[in-house]
Every structure is written in C-alpha cells, then in structure tokens.
Image (cartoon, rainbow, N blue to C red):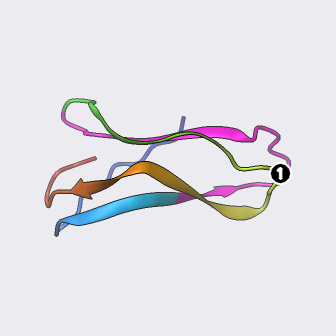
Amino acid sequence: VLGLRFTTSVAGTITSFRYYKAGGETDTTHTGNIYLSSTGALVATTGAFNDGSCSNAWVSAPLISPFTTSPGVEY
C-alpha cells in the first residue's frame, strides 16, 4: 500500500488518478482508494482493475464514480 495526503484550495472533481508502473512488476490487478483523512472513511474507489502487461509507464486508473473534493479537507 502506498499513500499520500492531499488537500485542495478549491472544490473540484476527481475522475481518475495515475501511477507509475515500473518494469519487472508482475502483478496486473490493482485497486485504488481515496479516504477521508480525519475519519478513514472510504470516499472513492477504482474497484479492481487490470493494468495488463504495461511496464515503465504511467497508468490511468478511473474511479467507479467521480468524486467531488471540498476545499481545505485532507484526503
């Protein structure tokens, strides 16, 4: 599991996120989640998706449903 915390200064909508898949990684099924930092509540997910055999590339992971962020909230 790899995570990062972020906040926004304006409201916005997240429809997907990207991650870098390095060469040699053999796992092709992933799940991406966004949590509310203050409570740990799950607010958005990609569900399980298969990124195939791509490597040394940026992979786009679409969320199941778009997620609207609020200014100043930590995710």
Q: List x then y, in percent, for residue 75.
A: 28, 47
Residue 37 shown left or right of residue 64 in the figure: left
The answer to whether residue 31 is magenta is: yes
Q: Which residue lies furthest to the bottom in this view?
A: 10
Residue 19 shown left or right of residue 12 in the figure: right
Q: List x then y, in percent, for residue 54.
A: 80, 57
Residue 10 shown left or right of residue 4 in the figure: left
Identify the amino acid type marked 1.
Ser
Residue 30 shown left or right of residue 25 in the figure: left
Q: List x then y, in percent, for residue 1.
A: 54, 34
| Residue shown at the point (20%, 30%) measured from the top left | 39
The answer to whether residue 47 is magenta is: no
Q: Residues within 10 Å of mark 1 (few under 14, many from 20)?
A: few
| Residue shown at the point (80%, 57%) measured from the top left | 55
| Residue shown at the point (14%, 57%) measured from the top left | 72
Q: Mark 1 points at which residue?
A: 53
Please report the bounds of the magenta region as a residue range.
Answer: 18-38
